[in-house]
Structures are given as C-alpha cells and as structure tokens.
Amino acid sequence: MIQIIGRFHPLILHLPIGILVLAFIMEWLSRKAKFAHLKLAVGISLHIGMWSAILAAISGYILSWEGGYEETLVNRHQWLGIATACSSIALVILHINRVKRIGKLLYFPTFIGLMIILMITGHLGGSLTHGSDFLSAPLTQEKEEAKSFSPVDRNNALIYQDVIFPIFKQKCTRCHNTSKRKGKLLMSTIDGLKKGGENGPFFISGNVSESLFLQRIHLPLDDKEHMPPKGKNQLTKKDIALLEWWIEEGAPFDKKLNEVESSENIKSILSEKFPDNSDVFAQPISQADDQDIIKIKENGINIQKLSEDLPFLTANLSHKKNLSKKTFQQLDKISDQLIEIDLNSSNINDELLRSLSNFPHLCKISLQKTEITNDGLIALEQLKFLQHLNLYKTNISNEAVESLSKMPQLRHLYVWETNFTDIGKLELLEKRPMIDVNTGVSIEIFGKSTLSPPEIIPQNELFIDSTLIELQSSFKDVNIYYTLDGTKPDSNSIKYISPFYIKNSREIQSLAMKENWISSDISSKTIAKARYKISKIELSSEPNEKYSANGPTSLIDLKKGKNDFNDGSWIGYQGRNFSVMLDLENKKPISSISIGSIEDTNSWIFYPKSIQISISTDGKNYQRIAQKSIPTALEPSASNTRNFIVNLLNEVNTRFIKVDVKSNLKNPSWHPNHDEPCWVFIDEIMIE
C-alpha cells in the first residue's frame, strides 16, 4: 500500500503547481481595483495548494525508495519539494495574518519566493522523468542531427559506436541514463549495458532468443513489459535486424564493420547508413534556410523536403510554359540541397537546360514531353550524382549515347517514344552495362499496367464562338471515351475518333482503355464560353496590392491566367471574401457563369469554398439564383487552374449580376501552417 501511495506522486504533483500558480496570479491581479473581488478566492486556493504540496512531498519521498534515479538529482528534488510544502504552510499563516505588520511585510515576498522554489522543483522533477536535457533538447536537436549526418567511412566504422549506440540513444537512453535508471538499467554507457538491470543481464552474447532486451522488444505493443513502452518512439524492423545481428556476432564493443560477417539484408541496411563517397547522401550538406524556401515558393515554384531528417529538396516545375534563366536563378540559394527536379511537359529547351549544371547534387531529372535534343544533354555530363533521367517523348536519338555514357552515376534511363533505337541501346550498354535502359512496358514481364489519363487539349480554354478539342494519350492503340456534361465516362460513353468542336461551356471528362491494361484515371477540364461582352465591372473591395493585375478589367479580357499566380493575370485576396458586380448594359438571357481560379496549396492558395450568383434589375437590390460549392483540398497539390461553371436552373433575363466569391479564409487543419489566413485568386469571369 505504501508503494502504491508513492506511485501516485506523478498525479498529485500537478495539483500544487497549478493551484499555487493560480493563487499567485489572482493575488497579483487583486491588487488592482478592477480585480479586487479575487481576494476572496486567494485564501481558499492557498489552503488547497498547501495540502496538495504536502501530499506531493510525502508521496515523492516514498517513491524515491524504489531507486533507479540519479541520487544527487533525487536529493535536490526531494529537499526542494519539502521546501515547497513548508513555504506553502508559511504562506497560509502569513495570509491569515496579512493585516498584521509581519504579514504585510513578509506575505508577498514569501509568495514570490515560493514561485521560484516551485519552478526549480518542477524543473528537477522533469529532469528525473524525461532526462536532464529535456528542456534543451529542442534547441540542440538540429545541431545533433547535423553532427549525426556527418559521413562516416564504412571501413573505419565501429559496430557499437556507429551502428548500435545511435539506436539506443534515439530510442532507449531517455529512460535509461545517469539521471533516470528505469529498472536500474543504464544504457548510456558500455559498463551499464554489461551490468544489466534489476531483471538480470541486458543481453547474452551470441544468443538472440535469451537476450532479455530483444525478448522485451518482440512483446506485443500493448504488453506492459514491451520496450520501448507504448507511446514512445518505437524501433523499426531495420533497427531490430541490426540489434539481433550485433548479438549474433557476440555483441562486440570494439570491432569494425569490416571485421565481421553480415548477411545480404544487413549489408543492404548498412549501405544505407554508410553509403560510399559517390553517393550524394554521403556528402556533408547543411540544411537550406527556411526563409529562402518560403521565398521560392512565393514565386510559384513548388519546393518539397525529401525528409524532415535530411537537408535534400525537390523542385516541381512540370507543365510550366514560362520557364526562363531567371526561374532557375531563383533556385541558386538551394543549389546544394536540390537533388530532384521535375520539368515534365514544360518549355525547357537545350539552352535553358544548361542552367541545371548549377545544381551539382541533382540525382533525378524528369524531362519527358519536352523539346530537349541530343545537344542539350551535353550540359548534364558534369552532374556526377545523376542516377535517374527521363527522356520519354523527347527529340533525342542514338547520337545521345556519347553524352549518356559520360554520366558516371546514371542507372535508370527512360527513352520511350524517342528516336533512340535498339541499336543505340546496345551501343550504350557496351559502354555502360549497369544502366537500365527502359524503352517501353512489356506485358509479359510486368502483367497488367495502368494507363495514364488522356490529355485534354483545347484550341482555346476561353472562347467566344466555338473551339476545337483534341484528346491525346501517351500510349498507342488505346480507346478514349469522353463526356461533355461533367459525368464520369465509361466504355458506353462517346468514343473519341478525331478532334471535335464545342459551342457552349463544357466540363469535359475522359479516360483511356486498352485490352490487358488497367483503365486510366479520369482527366477533366472545363472549357468556358463568353457569350456576352461585359460593359462594366466593379469589385466590392480592393485586392491585395501585389496581386491586383490590371484592375477589375483583368477579369473580362479573355486572357486566361497561367499555372503561376505571379504571372500578373490573377487578382488575389487573403483571408476574406469578396464580390464582383457585372453590368451587361442591357437585359440579356443568361444560363451560366464561369469563373477561373488557381490552387497552389504550398503557397496557401485554395480554390473558393463556394460561388454564389445573384441578379438585379436596378444594380442595387440583388436576388440569389444559384450557388456552387467547391470541396476544400484534403492534401497538398501542385499548382493547377480550373474554370468553375455555375449553371442556372432556368435561363433568366437580367442586366446586373453579382458574383460572391467565398474563401476558405484559413488553411485547413492538415496544412503545415493551418489556421493561417489563406488566399483565393480569380482571373476570368464569363457569361453565357
């Protein structure tokens, strides 16, 4: 029973901390006339705080009998806990006698002294529970990670120091250190591991099944003996494999990696931890400045971290048709950290490709569906870490062999639908036999594969009379089916034969199908018609100065904004709704209104939450006639534009139209900067 009372200490100790701090705040405030009524509550709070402090001191003293903690730290915490209880008793006595001279003189200074003692006692208690570095850990974590990333020569790496101890340090030593020896086990020193804990030896050399710590690791997560405890940072399968290997090899503390045998699985795991010097992950690269990354994102370039633990970054510039030297100059501040760049379907050309030589650690480059030629590849020869190169549907030929063979680390090459023939492939493999040259998909090898969605290519996404629509697939001999009313297509839908015209606003959806292939996802694009010319346009409020384009007339100039919110075509608002008033000059029949918008979640830009349409006969009194709700993005996405069509139930005659654009106002809960004010952008409003 006494032991149970001691174990109530972690629960009881929070009471005096909270109650006495609250009493101090009320005492401080009650000295002002506005909060004088709080004086009545101070006395009650002090009495409750005093008794809870006494109970905390008693239970803490009993808990200390169990041992397992650093003695000096326990003694300091214990005596300060007793001092807290005694000070609270003295404070209650002074509060009762606060009208007397001694009470007036000592009451508040004693209260301040109690707060200081309480903070120090709490800090020492936290150090006992979580380790002496608990408070400083967030401040030193980045430095420790930077140190841990320093490359280690595999030939000189020590099994325990460089492989095993880092696992213990990350997953175990917070509860088994010199300050806190849970189970009387010390794991921060070799002597502590050899000595073991209250349950016996920590391990048995050469015997995995009888080693206590491995038995505890393999227990079910809900088992109270499982280690690390549920809720703590758990060991990975790779961690466990390394620990078992260490025990099988006799648990050596002074051997090097090259002095012991290891299986193929262990070799694979170790190669990740100790890559050779030709691997980019072995390079001593520091973290990029977060402000530099934010600034690049604000300029419309999607930058992502490869991992929170590593400094490497990826850049997505796919489908951008306005790339220039200035675009790549913006990436100069992260040139060391950039290891992957996606230029798929962009306007990259041989001249611009030379800019990539400024990014020495690039490992993967996607250039599919671009105008790159053999000459452009010369610029990539000096990228000594380049491993993946996608040249699908580009203008390269067998002449590219000379440049490709000079890329020292190239391992994966994709040359579908190019002029790079089997002759070129054989020639390249003679020079570089380790390169995997991928010229297409073999059903015999891979079985059924998934088709990519068809590409919907309009002659004009915004049109006045009619526009030509073309559907393209990346694969040969596929059947494309499409719909024009926003419904999902299937094999019973319209089959695409050749380009066709549309004369009204349409939401086109399409998919690709082929025998022995899995049908593609559905592609979608909204094509909008401007039936009427808008004679006058007004905004309910001024947009952000940086994103005001050429004023309200930018919304009716039939110039669609690009996939870059900085291109000068977009009107943007942050953290607020707005309205657009349109005047057709005369009454005209209308059936739908379309609004163009852009979404770039990394830049805090989201599509509108809803669009509401109202009409008026006098331009003053409006009646709502239609509304379209738009789902909020549920995950990060690259920059993309859409036209939203709001169809009316019935055609109406009107002159004045009001478009209310409702924003999400704040970034959603999944966003890294959730609850911060988000943006909404529009570019073109068209009436049919």
Image (cartoon, helix red, strand yellow):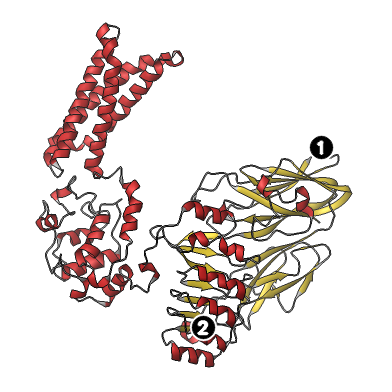
Viewer-nearest of labels 1 and 2? Answer: 2
Q: CA distance from mark 1 to mark 2?
A: 68 Å
- At 30% from the left edge and 62% from the top edge, which residue is drawn? 236
99 is higher (above) or lower (below) than 415: above
Residue 479 image offset from top left, x and y in percent? 65, 79
Q: Is residue 458 left or right of residue 585?
A: left
491 is higher (above) or lower (below) than 577: below
The picture quadrant where one finds residue 53 is top left
To which residue does mark 1 refer? 620
To which residue does mark 2 refer? 403
**Extreme residue toward the right, this view:** 586
Is residue 182 or residue 574 the one in the foreground? 574
Q: Which secondary structure lies at badge 2? A: helix
423 is higher (above) or lower (below) than 446: below
Going by the numbered disc 1, the residue's amino acid type is Lys
The picture quadrant where one finds residue 533 is bottom right
657 is higher (above) or lower (below) than 472: above
Q: Residues within 10 Å of mark 2 (few under 14, many from 20)?
A: some
Is residue 479 or residue 560 the one in the foreground? 560
Going by the numbered disc 2, the residue's amino acid type is Ser
Q: Is residue 369 at least partly visible in the picture?
A: no
Q: Is residue 393 left or right of residue 578?
A: left
Q: Is residue 173 at least partly visible in the picture?
A: yes
